[in-house]
């Protein structure tokens, strides 16, 4: 039975990877000569196949979770990659467990809807002769890379998927490479992520130097054994795990205890870059230079969620370090509020949503740092639906407005784009945390956990919730309410069927996805619902290290139902405040700008972080580069010229003797021979 399960999971895992990759290869290889305007079909078919396989995997693991004593974690060997030592970290293995299943279903399903949406969007925005097939090839490669990241059973495969996702983001953000702004945004995303990835790579090297293995099972079991008994460790168990004697196990245990915090913080460096947290967040707003489907794919289901997934996956390492957990929580909570304040004053719809993504990712890291890892992953799941919906909705507006996405240039679109308007409002309500929609349940759980373990960050999370509701509906009211305003020369029209299909499906998810994480229970919220449902129970075996650490720190939940009611009231209050500011009393924002010009200027200019980075980092590095170039050009090259001058002069002098006359060469040889004979005879 076990071998049959391993074989079926192995085949499904290979298909999940190969189907999108095959679609990408067909779109890229056959798109221009054969498929042209039909280049989307192989990618849609490949991602659809990956969705089906992911659902089958989910059903299998979910079925095992309901059998007493059955394993819900399967390490499936695929093939031996390289042989070195015992070869454990050079083997390609897939890890199938509840976290893998949730991530695979989320990534593939959202990606499928984005690819379907892209069929109409890219057909009108990019003629098939100019990159249509290239775009879909990149999408398929992106899905393959993210699935490889999730499926990998060791840190080497995690790192390869991690870097492949970064490469795909570079290609897609810079898809319109002829635009200087798009090319610059792609380079910025790539370079900023290299900073975080450098720390991530160091963490993996340090894990190997400390433990001698990089497969998840061995590393996590070794850390658990080393940190057992309240940090005193169990050297005997560690020795059995690593196959070493007691004295060697004691040394390894001491190294793990001394280095676990450093390893966790270095791993978190990678998450900070990939998931756009302070201070490495600045690449994500600029990533809006890519096509709107790319924004939805990067922000909703793939690249930016990789950091959250990695911290949740490495829960044993992070939960073993109180310092690391505090850093994760503080960075997440501060980033959530920081990005929300910037979103208050922006005019570009996609950039508002980009800062919203940064803020919501901050919520996820806040949940992880407050030991509510299942709630953080739950928020990742619900966020994928409503954020993809909002980005695709913004793309629909941009599509109708002839590429214009600035809120100052249009308004009153609810009559022109009725279906886009309805779906956009649904996504906005979910993002704002409106009661009973998807975002409400997951965000509320994180706020509860924050108030339990870190009350100050809980207060910041509540403030962020108010600001989120306000800036989200500021965008809604400015775009869709009021008098109809359309840019001159634009023929506004509703999106096509392929685009509306994706918006409709995502709207359903934005409403109902949250109910996977609640339980029908008398006496709960409104006497019907209680938080922490089937979703959390399914993830519990993977998230147990966080739960155990939370119990050690005193409880897992807090706030009671009154906090749920308060967060709901604040969300509604933020929506009503936006209605007052931008519908009933539209003169109020101007009054605020006049009364607090410095505050508005700082928020509108994003706290001048980009300018500060440019003046303090980019320009000094460029000056240093120019100085190094000048040093090489004039000093080093000058020294080399002087050194080579002597052989050049000698060569020039001797060159006069080489005149090409054979008689002269013969005379020289005879003269030399005569001199040698005379020296021998008379010496």
Image (tube, rainbow, N blue to C red):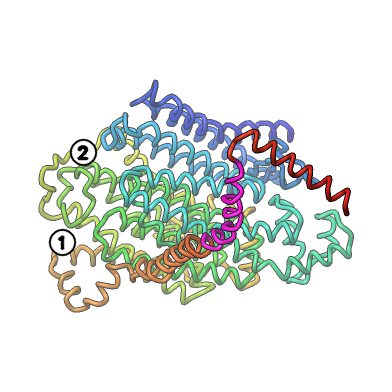
Q: Residue at x 57, y 43 (%)?
A: 101
Query: Which secondary structure dominates the residues rendered in magenta?
Result: helix
Image quadrant of residue 528?
A: bottom left
Picture quarter with the N terminus: top right
Number of the label disc, if any, that sits on residue 84: none
Left or right relative to 238: residue 427: left
User: What SS does tag 1 mark?
Assistant: helix
Q: Position of residue 493 (x, y in %)?
A: 18, 38
Tell whether position 644 is magenta.
yes
Image quadrant of residue 276?
A: bottom left
Number of the label disc, if any, that sits on residue 583: 1
Question: Magenta stretch?
Answer: 637-658
Q: Residue at x 76, y 67 (%)?
A: 255
- Position above or below: 31 against 568: above
Q: Residue at x 43, y 44 (%)?
A: 171
- Position above or below: 268 against 594: above
- Position above or below: 659 against 642: above
Whole-angstrom CA distance, mark 1 to mark 2, is 24 Å
Mark closest to the chain's N terminus, 1 or 2: 2
Left or right relative to 36: residue 645: right
- Position above or below: 636 against 80: below
Picture quarter with the C terminus: bottom right
Tell whether position 595 is magenta.
no
- The residue that disc 2 covers is 494
């Amino acid at each position: 039975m076990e071998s049959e399960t391993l074989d079926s999971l192995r085949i499904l895992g290979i298909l999940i990877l190969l189907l999108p990759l095959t679609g990408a290869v067909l779109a890229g290889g056959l798109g221009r000569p054969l498929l042209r305007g039909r280049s989307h079909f192989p990618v849609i078919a490949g991602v659809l196949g990956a969705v089906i396989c992911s659902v089958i995997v989910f059903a299998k693991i979910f079925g095992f979770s309901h059998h007493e004593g059955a394993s819900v974690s399967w390490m499936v060997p695929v093939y031996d990659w390289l042989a070195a030592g015992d070869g454990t970290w050079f083997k390609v293995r897939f890890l199938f467990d509840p976290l893998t299943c949730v991530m695979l279903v989320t990534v593939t399903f959202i990606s499928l809807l984005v690819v379907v949406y892209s069929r109409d969007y890219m057909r009108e925005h990019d003629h098939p002769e100019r990159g249509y097939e290239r775009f879909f090839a990149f999408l398929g490669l992106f899905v393959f890379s993210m699935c490889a990241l999730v499926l990998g059973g060791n840190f080497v495969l995690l790192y390869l998927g991690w870097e492949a996702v970064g490469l795909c983001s570079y290609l897609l953000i810079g898809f319109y490479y002829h635009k200087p702004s798009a090319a610059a945004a792609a380079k910025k995303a790539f370079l900023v992520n290299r900073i975080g990835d450098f720390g991530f790579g160091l963490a993996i090297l340090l894990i190997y130097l400390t433990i001698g293995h990089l497969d998840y099972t061995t590393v996590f079991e070794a850390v658990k054994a080393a940190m057992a008994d309240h940090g005193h460790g169990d050297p005997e168990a560690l020795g059995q795990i690593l196959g070493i004697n007691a004295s060697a196990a004691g040394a390894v245990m001491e190294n793990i205890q001394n280095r676990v915090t450093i390893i966790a913080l270095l791993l978190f460096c990678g998450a900070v870059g990939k998931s756009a947290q302070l201070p490495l967040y600045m690449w994500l707003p600029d990533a809006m230079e890519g096509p709107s489907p790319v924004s939805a794919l990067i922000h909703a289901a793939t690249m930016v969620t990789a950091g959250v997934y990695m911290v949740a996956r490495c829960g044993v390492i992070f939960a073993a370090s109180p310092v690391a957990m505090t850093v994760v929580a503080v960075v997440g909570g501060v980033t959530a509020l920081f990005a929300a304040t910037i979103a208050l004053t922006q005019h570009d719809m996609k950039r508002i949503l980009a800062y919203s993504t940064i803020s919501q990712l901050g919520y996820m890291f806040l949940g992880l740092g407050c030991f509510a890892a299942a709630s953080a992953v739950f928020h990742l799941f619900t966020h994928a639906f409503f954020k993809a919906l909002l980005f695709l909705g913004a793309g629909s507006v941009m599509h109708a407005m002839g590429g214009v996405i600035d809120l100052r240039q249009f308004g009153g679109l609810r009559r022109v784009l009725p279906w886009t308007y309805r779906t956009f409002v649904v996504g906005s309500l979910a993002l704002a945390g409106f009661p009973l929609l998807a975002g409400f349940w997951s965000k509320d759980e994180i706020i509860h956990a924050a108030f339990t373990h870190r009350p100050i960050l809980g207060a910041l999370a509540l403030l962020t919730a108010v600001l989120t509701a306000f800036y989200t509906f500021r965008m809604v009211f400015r775009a869709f309410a009021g008098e109809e305003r359309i840019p001159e020369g634009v023929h506004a029209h509703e999106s096509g069927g392929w685009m509306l299909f994706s918006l409709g499906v995502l709207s359903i998810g934005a409403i109902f996805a949250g109910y996977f994480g609640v339980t029908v229970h008398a006496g709960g919220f409104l006497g019907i619902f209680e938080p922490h449902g089937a979703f959390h129970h399914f993830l519990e075996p993977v998230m147990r290290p966080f739960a155990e650490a939370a119990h050690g720190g005193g409880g897992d939940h807090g706030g009671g139902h009154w906090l749920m009611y308060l967060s709901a009231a604040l969300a509604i209050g933020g929506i009503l405040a936006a209605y007052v500011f931008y519908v009933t009393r539209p003169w109020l924002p101007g009054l605020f700008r006049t009364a607090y010009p410095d505050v508005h200027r700082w928020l509108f200019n994003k706290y001048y972080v980009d300018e500060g980075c440019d003046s303090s980092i980019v320009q000094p590095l460029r000056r240093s580069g120019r100085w190094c170039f000048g040093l090489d050009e004039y000093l080093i090259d000058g020294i080399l010229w002087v050194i080579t001058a002597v052989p050049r002069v000698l060569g020039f002098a001797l060159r006069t003797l080489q005149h090409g006359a054979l008689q002269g060469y013969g005379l020289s040889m005879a003269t030399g021979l005569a001199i040698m004979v005379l020296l021998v005879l008379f010496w």
